[in-house]
Image: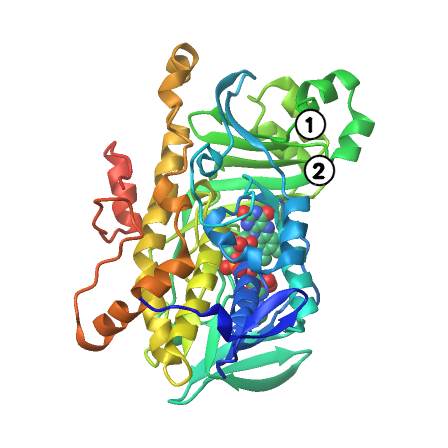
């Protein structure tokens, strides 16, 4: 087993102990959640990093999402960021609701916070939810305090490499330049330009047949515009609430109620079919009436909340499938994809941001264990350690979505306890420590890559052997009445 010795720490900046320099230089393409988390952990582990981000400044679009404990494994090493995380997280309780407005199941805290549960984010209280703008701001501020350079307004349009280094082509205000480093990390999201270099093919995205209206409404707007009865009905709980309303056959609604904001993620069957209309953009919005009409089966009080969505702020996000891509690393090993660029998730997996952050921690650790001169092997080791886990969790999201849309509401009314396990996040997902896993398995995996020594991943459900799957295969299984299985 490899180790990271804390006595090799050399500098302390903003309360963060930085390990001794490795001399490995890294360019990160994309300052989203995965890119920034990687920038921070790579800096802490002694690598030199710089980020290129296409947006002209920090993008504060987005609503709420969950990032589970494995992503925060090293948060305790960043004391000011940890304090900000604890201040800004929404410690919500989860429950499942009938569309007509009554509670079916109360789940409460995530299983990782149950008495006796041990999760990898030591000393951190990890709730169900954070806001995406809040996390993006938190990571960016920490980068700034550590002096990590983020070049805004720089769009990376090409990736290449030689035996010694990786190179990106950057467009900044019409100027084209090139930059090189030992490693380039493509953390540029679902529209990444890196596939041509990494796998030699474009990754086809197809419509899953569903889309999601999503957004956030400040609590002040609700308080100002709704009767005290409605405010009392939805916002009287001591803790924020994360409710999932089931309204089969083809819709479900994620609702977050807190005294800071009201957030909604409304999944619906989408009949858009042309590529032009299938948008994956946080700027593609729809009128509020369209949202309310599509979800008119929800209880009337909730519809009053939805009517308050500021005009043209509801994002219409197409849920697209991509076959799992096993190859995240270029042949030469110097360009590696991370987060959504390697593996996009359906929101029902609740794991997109978590897995991007797990990637970040795993890759930074593999690079440190490998050391200067073996960076291009480290990226392949990381890929081997991560792919099967991520792909299995992607399939888990397919499974949850299908279960949510196929609930028998009459049975649910009579026997709600039959739904007790529906939204329970399995322990193999939330208890994983990506840093320790990389340390424990680096050497065997490196041998596996170099000389074929057998290696079996253990970051999967117990007793499960990974099986490759495809979107077409899952659609066919669904059409035959079978649900996805893990
Ligand atoms: C603005 C925005 C809002 C979001 N809001 C939500 C939300 O509310 N809920 C949710 O569940 N998920 C949201 N997501 C997606 C979520 O952040 C990701 O699914 C997840 O966190 C994985 O992160 P990632 O870093 O892989 O990708 P992302 O977070 O998508 O980050 C990718 C980054 O790369 C940048 N980029 C793209 N192309 C280039 C290029 N060619 N050159 C340089 N930079 C490039 C993008 O601007 C972006 O900052 C949002 C993403 C974005 C970009």
Q: Is residue 111 above or below residue 245?
A: below
Label 2 Cα neighbours within 10 Å, binned few <14 / some 14-19 / many ≥20: many
Q: Residue at x 55, y 47 (%)?
A: 124
User: Left of 293 or right of it: where is 327?
Assistant: left
Q: Mark on residue 217?
A: 2
Q: Is residue 407 above or below residue 444?
A: above
Label 1 within 8 A of ligand 1 by Cβ? no
What quarter of the picture does the N terminus occupy?
Answer: bottom left
Residues at marks 1 and 2 touching, judged by CB atoms closer than 8 Å: yes
Residue 214 found in image quarter = top right
Residue 327 seen in this snapshot: no
User: Left of 190 or right of it: where is 263?
Assistant: right
Which residue is labeled 1 in the image?
305
Q: Residue at x 38, y 36 (%)?
A: 400
Residue 234 found in image quarter = top right
Give the Cα separation between the discs numbered 1 and 2: 9 Å
Q: Is residue 405 above or below residue 161?
A: above
- Secondary structure under tag 1 reads helix
Residues 349 and 312: in front is 349
Label 1 Cα neighbours within 10 Å, binned few <14 / some 14-19 / many ≥20: many
Residues 480 and 162: in front is 162
Q: Mark on residue 55?
A: none
Residues 364 and 195: in front is 364
Q: Is residue 106 above or below residue 340?
A: above
What quarter of the picture does the C terminus occupy?
Answer: top left
Residue 462 point in image, percent of width and height: 25, 44
- Secondary structure under tag 2 reads strand
Q: Residue furthest top?
A: 414
């Amino acid at each position: 087993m490899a180790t990271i010795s804390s006595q090799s720490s050399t500098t302390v900046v903003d309360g963060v102990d930085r390990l001794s320099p490795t001399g490995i230089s890294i360019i990160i393409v994309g300052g989203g959640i995965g890119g920034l988390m990687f920038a921070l952990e790579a800096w802490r582990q002694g690598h030199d990093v710089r980020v290129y981000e296409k947006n002209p400044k920090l993008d504060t679009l987005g609503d709420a999402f969950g990032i589970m404990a494995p992503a925060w494994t090293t948060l305790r090493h960043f004391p000011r960021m940890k304090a900000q995380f604890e201040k800004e997280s929404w410690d919500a309780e989860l429950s499942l609701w009938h569309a007509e407005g009554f509670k079916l199941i109360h789940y409460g805290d995530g299983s990782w916070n149950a008495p006796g549960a041990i999760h990898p984010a030591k000393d951190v209280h990890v709730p169900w939810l954070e806001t995406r703008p809040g996390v993006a701001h938190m990571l960016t501020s920490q980068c700034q305090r550590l002096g990590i350079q983020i070049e805004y307004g720089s769009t990376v349009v090409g990736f290449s490499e030689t035996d010694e280094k990786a190179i990106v082509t950057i467009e900044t205000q019409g100027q084209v330049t090139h930059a090189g480093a030992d490693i380039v990390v493509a953390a540029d999201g679902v529209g990444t330009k890196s596939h041509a270099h990494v796998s030699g093919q474009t990754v086809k995205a197809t419509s899953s047949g569903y889309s999601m209206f999503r957004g956030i409404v400040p609590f002040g707007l609700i308080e100002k515009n709704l009767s005290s009865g409605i405010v009392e009905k939805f916002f009287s709980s001591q803790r924020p609430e994360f409710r999932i309303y089931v309204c089969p056959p083809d819709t479900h609604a994620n609702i977050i109620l807190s005294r800071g904001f009201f957030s909604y993620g409304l999944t619906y069957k989408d009949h858009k079919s042309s590529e032009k209309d299938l948008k994956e953009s946080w700027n593609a919005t729809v009128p509020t009436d369209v949202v309310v009409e599509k979800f008119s089966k929800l209880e009337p009080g909730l519809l009053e909340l939805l009517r308050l969505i500021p005009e043209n702020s509801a994002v219409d996000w197409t849920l697209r499938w991509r076959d799992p891509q096993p190859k995240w690393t270029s042949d030469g090993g110097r360009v590696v994809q991370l987060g959504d660029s390697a593996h996009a998730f359906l929101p029902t997996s609740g794991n997109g941001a978590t897995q991007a952050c797990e990637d970040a921690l795993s890759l930074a650790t593999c690079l440190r264990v490998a050391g200067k001169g073996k960076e291009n092997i480290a990226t392949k080791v990381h890929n081997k350690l991560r792919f099967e886990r991520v792909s299995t969790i992607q399939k888990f999201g397919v499974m949850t979505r299908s279960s949510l849309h196929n609930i028998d509401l009459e049975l649910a009314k009579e026997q709600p306890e039959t739904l007790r396990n529906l939204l329970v996040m399995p322990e193999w997902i939330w208890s994983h420590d990506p840093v320790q896993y990389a340390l424990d398995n680096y050497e065997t995996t490196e041998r596996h890559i170099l000389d074929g020594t057998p290696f079996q991943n253990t970051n999967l459900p117990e007793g499960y052997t990974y099986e490759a799957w495809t979107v077409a295969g899952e659609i066919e299984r669904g059409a035959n009445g079978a649900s996805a299985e893990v």
